[in-house]
């Protein structure tokens, strides 16, 4: 049995209540095909896709329905057989409203897609595939970082002589409260995930693989360690138990914890020879390479007190939140807040017709009582200069100075305090005794800064 005490960590951070009990023991459940899906054309970083289908077209599951020729982009596929009803604006969980392909599901021949984890076992050999085959499959499947960032995975893993990579770090922390989708993937799709990890390491030419898992997931640590030990010939791959602390799953924080290295401010991990991938992304890589299946489904955690049947659900990307709520038995009491993601970094959504995207790992349903208890519903009072926000900031920023500058539209001062280095983890807001929504100010500051740049550019 592996030593599961997480000895490794990063400076700063906090430890909010974990609340994993709602769904951590719920096996992944396949949901029935909804009558309609709305597949957003913007669900990754980089160029927005242009639709490749038109109204009234018949589409099949897995067919490309949107793409872009830009280097940083990823195609989008239909998760069902059906007919394009419209191409129109739909609510987006992060950026307001954006174009989507609305597909009415065909009544016949639409059995729910099943996970492919049973097709993988310990005998999987990444050497059956060339680097070119792996990169092509990942590109064609439209795989993006499923942990939330949504960066096209092909760009991350393909060989780049200008920026060679040595270490592949797997982000298996899932440090946000409530979320358990990656945990269930680790337990139930272990061999598939490991296959994806080894394929990604081969494509990225990484000799070393480190899987960072928080020590509140001992079962996952043991299952993956045992699986690795079953194969003595799979190279330098190790599980690294890390301390349970938020935001341990932040890319920069995980690298610090696992490798003791610092990614320079304003830079990205490949500049220091590191590639970071999330657990679900690795499972998607394995599926794409072995079966050719595009990324049309994902596991979503449904959790919180205000939903009848919390759990981990395998859903088509493009399913509307309201349809998933109905499948989960509906709301148990008036939900005061529905959050796409977890309570620290997620986005509250006002419209339940919002579709799920490739990066939607969770829906958190908070009751009125939970929201009333939450800091952000309380009255903001003046800063008492306690310094707590500084001590928890994992990026060593001065959050109160940045927030104050943004409040007074002094973007020059905010930038001097490294506004753009903030990873929006929410730790500063979480600990502030004056209930100042510091992260909110910082996010607003980034938007104002981007607008300013656009105006001047
Ligand atoms: S300033 Fe940014 S990075 Fe620092 S604690 Fe606040 S939200 Fe997190
Ligand atoms: S935690 Fe709040 S009250 Fe304390 S210094 Fe930061 S902004 Fe001020």
Image (cartoon, rainbow, N blue to C red):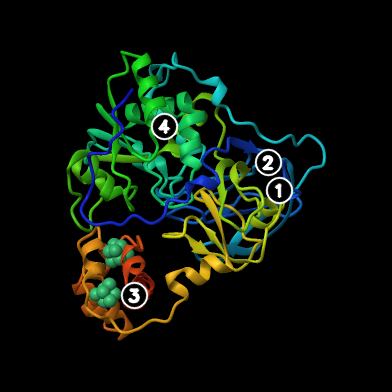
* Along the viewing direction, whichever of 243 and 73 lies nearer the viewer: 243
With respect to residue 372, does 30 lie above or below? above
State the residue position of label 4: 220
Asked if the residue under mark 4 is in contact with the one under mark 3, i.e. CB atoms within 8 Å, the reply is no
Which callout, 3 or 4, points at the residue further toward the start of the chain?
4
Residue at coordinates 34% horizontally, 75% vertically from top-left? 445
State the residue position of label 1: 327
Q: How far apart in space, not on screen, are marks 4 and 1 (Cα)?
A: 28 Å
Quadrant location, ligand no. 2: bottom left
Where disc 2 sits, the SS reads loop
Q: How far apart in space, not on screen, are marks 3 and 4 (Cα)?
A: 39 Å
Which callout, 3 or 2, points at the residue further toward the start of the chain?
2
Q: Find out if the beta carbon at label 4 lies less than 8 Å from the nearest ligand 1 atom.
A: no
With respect to residue 446, does 339 lie above or below? above
Across and down, in percent, residue 59 comes to 71, 43
Across and down, in percent, residue 358 comes to 52, 48
Quarter occupied by residue 8: top left
Could you classify mark 4 by the number of other residues whose Cα lies within 10 Å: few (under 14), some (14-19), or many (20 or more)? Answer: many
State the residue position of label 2: 31
Q: Work out whether residue 276 can be spotted.
A: yes
Where disc 3 sits, the SS reads helix
């Amino acid at each position: 049995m592996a030593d599961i005490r997480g000895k490794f960590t990063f400076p700063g951070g906090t430890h909010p209540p974990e609340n994993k009990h709602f769904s951590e023991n719920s096996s992944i459940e396949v949901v029935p095909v909804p009558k309609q899906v709305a597949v957003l054309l913007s669900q990754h970083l980089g160029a927005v896709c242009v639709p490749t289908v038109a109204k009234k077209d018949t589409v099949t599951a897995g067919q490309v329905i949107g793409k872009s020729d830009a280097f940083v982009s990823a195609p989008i596929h239909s998760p069902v057989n059906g007919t394009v009803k419209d191409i129109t604006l739909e609510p987006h969980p992060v950026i307001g409203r954006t174009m989507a392909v609305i597909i009415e599901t065909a009544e016949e021949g639409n059995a729910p897609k099943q996970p492919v984890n049973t097709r993988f076992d310990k005998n999987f050999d990444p050497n059956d595939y060339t680097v070119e085959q792996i990169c092509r499959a990942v590109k064609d499947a439209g795989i993006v970082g499923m942990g939330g960032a949504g960066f096209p995975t092909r760009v991350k893993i393909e060989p780049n002589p200008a920026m060679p990579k040595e270490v592949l770090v797997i982000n298996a922390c899932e440090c946000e409260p409530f979320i358990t989708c990656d945990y269930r993937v680790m337990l139930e799709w272990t061999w598939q995930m490991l296959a994806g990890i080894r394929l990604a390491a081969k494509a990225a030419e990484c000799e070393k693989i480190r899987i960072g898992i928080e020590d509140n997931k001992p079962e996952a640590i043991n299952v993956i360690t045992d699986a690795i030990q079953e194969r003595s010939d799979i190279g330098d791959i190790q599980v690294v138990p890390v301390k349970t602390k938020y935001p341990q799953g932040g890319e920069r924080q995980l690298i610090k914890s696992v490798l003791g290295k610092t990614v320079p401010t304003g830079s990205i991990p490949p500049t220091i020879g590191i590639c970071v991938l999330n657990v679900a992304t690795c499972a998607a890589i394995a599926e794409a390479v072995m079966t050719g299946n595009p990324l049309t489904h994902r596991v979503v955690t449904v959790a919180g007190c205000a939903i009848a049947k919390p759990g981990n659900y395998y859903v088509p990307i493009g399913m509307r939140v309201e349809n998933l709520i109905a499948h989960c038995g509906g709301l148990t009491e008036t939900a005061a807040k529905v959050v796409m993601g977890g309570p620290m970094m997620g986005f509250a959504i006002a419209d339940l017709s919002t579709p799920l995207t490739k990066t939607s790992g969770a829906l958190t349903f908070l009751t009125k009582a939970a929201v009333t208890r939450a800091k952000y519903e309380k009255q903001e009072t003046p800063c008492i200069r306690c310094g707590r926000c500084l001590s928890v900031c994992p990026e060593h920023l001065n959050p109160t100075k940045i927030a104050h500058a943004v409040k007074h539209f002094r973007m020059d001062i905010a930038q001097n305090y490294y506004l753009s280095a903030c990873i929006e983890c929410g730790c500063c807001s979480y600990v502030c005794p004056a209930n100042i929504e510091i992260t909110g100010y910082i996010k607003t500051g980034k938007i104002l800064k981007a607008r300013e740049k656009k105006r001047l550019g």
